[in-house]
Image (cartoon, rainbow, N blue to C red):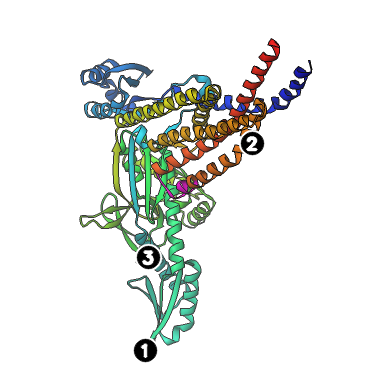
Amino acid sequence: MLKNSSKKPLLQRFKISYMAMFLALVLLAISALPNLYPAKSWLHLSTTQSQQHSQQLLANTPSQKSVIDFLNQHGFLVEQSIQVAQNSLSLNVLLQEPTKSAAAQQALKSEFTQLNAKIVTHQTSPDWLQSLGLAPIKLGLDLNGGVLFVLDVDLVKAQQEQLDSAYEQTKTIIRDEKARGVRVQKNAHGFELHALPAAKSDLAAVQANVLKRFERLMATAHSQGNLTTVAFSFSEQGSNAFDKEVMSQTLTTLRGRIEELGITEAVTQRQGKQRIRIELPGVQDPSEAKRIIGATASLDFYQLKEIGGKTFNLQNGGSINLDPIAIFSGQHINNAHAGRDEWGKPLVQLSLDSQGGEAMSAFSKRNIGKPMATVYSEYYKNVKGEVVKKSEVINVANIAQHLSSQFSITNMQSPQAAQDLALLLRAGSLTAPVTIVQEQTIGPSLGADNIHNGLAALMLGMGITLAFMALWYRRLGLVANIALLLNLTALVGLMSLLPGVVLTLPGIAGLVLTIGMAVDTNVIIFERIKEERRKGRAPYQAIEQGYQQAFATIFDANITTMITAIILYGIGYGPIKGFAITLALGLITSVFTGVYVSKALSQTLYLKLANKRGARA
């Protein structure tokens, strides 16, 4: 009676902590469940937008049967097909070998030019899991297949563009200040002002105005005879700050473009001083991504100049003179959508921010009935391999009324051109030219092989470990094995739950390493328990002391490894980052299951054995 009553407070003491651990494990197990239902790649086939507006072309659209027969005849065996719409061809097709989806897409585009073919990934997990917002672990490039781009950001060209803008604005400042004895001229490092002795006060006013507008420039004055010269160029500090700002803006813009493409598992990060690494897992057709990511388009709006100004080429031929200072640029565009006007011609509808809206409102109010030009600029490589900026006027329209923060760009060449321009403007324009210096495509079949080999290594290592612990530690080994399986489940659940966590092939190596470290935790504890038992302590006291004394050693070992993982995550990229984050999360779950869950299981096992002995007594 006394023994049984003494155990009730013990159970009550651990009841709350046991329930908290159990709840945490259940939640992590549920978040790990979607990984049992791998996503599948479907081909989504539909008629082009121009076809949908033409009944004659619509009549020539291939039927569902002809498309499926074509795929089967060319070795792309169809497992399932779903007709989405009845009036036009809108079909979802699942191949028996989804890894052939990209090849099937290219074959369909070649055979049926009137069809759009896109690869869309569909989740196969139960609806109740999807309703909770749970999804499988995001797979990296080496496991899911996809495309790797390495882009070079031309910071020198960006600085030169900034200096050219400052040069053009300086000419405007000289006119506004009416500094007749001051002239501006370009030089090798920027531009310079020249002033006669009588215009020194005007020179000081122009210099102050230029430095106020362009804070990152520095002015260096010197005299040549009776001529005073002030040279403007980037200061060292200003150059570094400008480069940092350009890289940050480029990263933000590229991430926005990738999101607009619907790619949610991309990795976009800086690599070195002026390069950006972009990984697009699951992308089997890199052409569209390359076309959008590599585009360095920008949009500016200018006033026409009848006399003087800067000459721009018209898109349809000819040239026109515009004010060199833009009314406002694409950076003030909040949103952009492709559409059609009342005659069915493609256009782009723009929405400006407050600063752009004020500039447009003020300009249009003063210039009703006068024309305004829209200039589209992009960088490209010429035959010499040099990066050159090409600017052309895509639209000249009279301002019919007082405009505000919303208006449209008309006379677009095609619906696709309107859609591309709207996408680029929504994501933001790039202030520096970017060049794709490396492109690597990894097929989904190679990714599937990597998953198979990685999981085989994981299962082999885990199987040997479980067998060793069960044979060597017997009853405590059973506790360790249960904790080990819970650790793996918790780690997979945690990686599935956290946004931004991507599993790579080195990440699987991190999983294997986590198993070893989790077992090492149990080995240290169990050896301590054995020592306490040899000292003559009762089983429950030996378990309590073993876990208590081993905790400091386990904590020190894990904290030093955690520091290494954080450093790897901070300075690494790609596969190194994947390994680091798996290792770091694995350390957390190893301590949780190896120390706390394992201790709860050991104490529960002891109490059940003690109850059985008490019952027999």
Residue that badge 1 annotates: 225
Q: Are marks 3 and 2 in contact (CB under 8 Å)?
A: no
In magenta stretch: residue 571: yes
| For marks 1 and 3 on the same chain, the one whose residue lies earlier in the sequence | 3
Residue 76 appears anywhere in the view: yes
Q: Are marks 2 and 1 in contact (CB under 8 Å)?
A: no
Find residue 491 and report its horizontal and vertical position in percent: 51, 31
User: Could you tell whether 607 is left or right of 494 in the image?
Assistant: right
| For marks 3 and 2 on the same chain, the one whose residue lies earlier in the sequence | 3
Residue that badge 2 annotates: 548
Q: Are marks 1 and 3 in contact (CB under 8 Å)?
A: no
Residue that badge 3 annotates: 164
Label 1 environment density (alpha carbons within 10 Å; few <14, some 14–19, many ≥20): few
User: Could you tell whether 162 is left or right of 103 in the image?
Assistant: right
Q: Where is 191 relative to 73, above or below?
A: below
Spatial CA span between label 2 and label 1: 86 Å
Q: Amino acid at mark 1?
A: Gly
Q: Where is 373 relative to 70, above or below?
A: below
Find residue 359 and report its horizontal and vertical position in percent: 50, 55
Q: Amino acid at mark 3?
A: Asp
Dividing the image into 4 quarters, which one contains the N terminus?
top right
What is the secondary structure assignment of the residue under circle 2?
A: helix
> Camera-side residue: 357 or 367?
357
Find residue 100 and report its horizontal and vertical position in percent: 28, 26
Camera-nearest label, 3 or 2: 2
Q: Amino acid at mark 2?
A: Gln
Principal secondary structure, stretch drawn in magenta: helix
> Camera-side residue: 269 or 78?
269
At a point 33% along the width and 34% down the height, the residue shown is: 145
At a point 49% along the width and 67% down the height, the residue shown is: 215
In magenta stretch: residue 76: no
Q: Which residues are magenta?
A: 566-574
